[in-house]
Image (cartoon, rainbow, N blue to C red):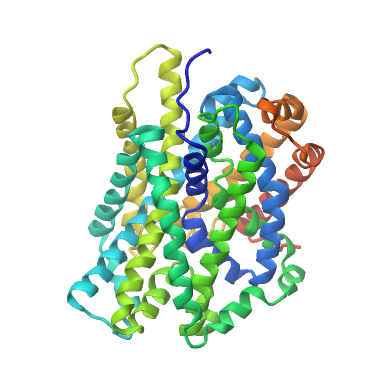
Amino acid sequence: MDKKRTQWGSNFGFIMSAIGSAVGLGNIWAFPFKMGQNGGFAFLIVYVILAVFVGLMIMVSELAIGRRTKLGVLGAYQKISKRFGWIGWLAVLSPLILLSFYCVLGGYCVEYMCYNLSEVAFGVGAGAADAGETIFSNMLSNQLGALIFALIFLGMCVIIVKNGIKGGIEKFNKIGMPALFVMLIIIIIRAVTLPGASEGIKFMLEPNLEPLKNDFIGVISTAGCQMFLSLSLAMGAMVTYGSYLGNKENIVKSAGTIIFADTLVAVLAGFAVLPAAFALNGSEAVLSGPKLLFITLQDVFNQMGFVGPIFGVIFYLLVIIAAVSSAISLLEVIATMIIDKREAKNKPVDRVKITAYICIPVVFLMAIVAIDGLGANGMWTPFSKSVGIIGSFNDCWLDFFDTLAEGILMPIGGLLMAIMIGWEYGTENIRDEIMLEGNKFKLYKLYRVCIRFVVPVMMLLILFGQISEIFGLKLL
């Protein structure tokens, strides 16, 4: 289909937007938490290796496919493959599921920012010893409040996406991403200077490969799923963003920059979160899941005295920016798919209406997660521990949706995409796309080996680890 395609306004705008898609709650919350669960340094090493030899190869492929076809993820896969074209639906379904809990967690962060802002203005409840746990418990039980703030968060994303690539997504990220880095550095400076913070730094940096001996596949599986979520892989975002790229863009360089920046933010988030957690509660704090972000850190801010709420506002604002930058890319995946379908049929395109229609299923799924309150409100949950069918999910809809998208759909999508490119579509087509306008692809031989062999094998290991966890099987 020969049609003009909107392009990014600048290389900087694309890079910031792609980094924004990659940098999200997966970096600020999930990465420190999962690193804490999997031995710190060992998890970090595995994650970096996977990011280079798997993440980079998948991202290069997705950006190239998007630019070559000038279509969103569903149309792109259907255009280049008759056998595997259907896997584009996996990359459309994953963002829809991710948005269901992303908006709720983003809403929680908006609530916490408002709470700290009220303390700055009125000094309400500052320094209460049990403030973090009390606030968190009250927030989860307030189902209507959780739903309202989730809707506020979703509304922020809709306003950005309805304005399109240049006027919405690019404009937001060109301001939001630099601001996020600045705020993150401010929080790190305070976190690492807290009494006892050195233990958290030691936990992150001290070489310790013991977890790999005890649970090798478990660490690989967790790091791999985190890589998919953190780098926005196999969820259609990079294919979609790639479809708006100009031919002069150096895809390999851009992908490397995105992965480096995303990993840097994840590591910096570890320095912002784990030292503060250790300073307050010791090593047990890093294993506390959502409590790490919403109880432990809030208690840290409460114990800082009058400056605590200020740091609280800054921290939760940066988390909101990270969450919005990722959520808008998830919305854009679905929006672009619908826009492409309508343009193919020569039907009028109204971004406002399309974005509004997308919100209908998102709000339905989001309401389930919000009302469930991370399992605090007694809702029935499929495949929960209480049901006893499978037994690894917590009694929480967020865990269920997260495992379904991050642990199952995205690794399967990555596996099938690698097989499609490596053994049907051909790596030479990706090479030719990357080398447009005189760009080099010095890593082509490594890319060819990785996309044909390394990526599929690692996807199978990640899937095996996830399935083993779900069914309670003993990992190697």
Residue at image position (54%, 40%) is 235
The relative height of residue 27 versus residue 211 in the rendered view (above or below) is: above
Which of these two is toward me, 50 or 141?
Answer: 50
Q: Quadrant of residue 126?
A: bottom left
Judge from the rendering whether residue 51 lies leftward or rightward of residue 175; answer left or right: right
Q: Please state if 171 lies on the left or on the right of 144 as rendered.
A: right
Identify the residue at horizontal 52%, vertical 87% (top origin).
196
Is residue 109 found left or right of 438 in the rendered image?
left
| The image quarter in which residue 342 lies | top left
- 241 vs 476, nearest the viewer: 241
Front residue of 450/371: it is: 450
Q: Position of residue 135 (x, y in %)?
A: 29, 73
Question: In the displayed structure, would residue 200 be above or below residue 117?
Answer: below
Is residue 182 in sight in this rendering? yes
Q: Position of residue 49 (x, y in %)?
A: 72, 56
Marker count (numbered): 0
Q: Where's residue 132, x and y in %? A: 34, 76
- Quarter of the rendering occupied by the C terminus: bottom right
Residue 86 in view, yes or no: no
78 vs 10: above or below: above
Residue that appears at 51% across and 33% down: 240
Q: Position of residue 51 (x, y in %)?
A: 67, 52
In the figure, is residue 271 to the left or right of 64? Answer: left
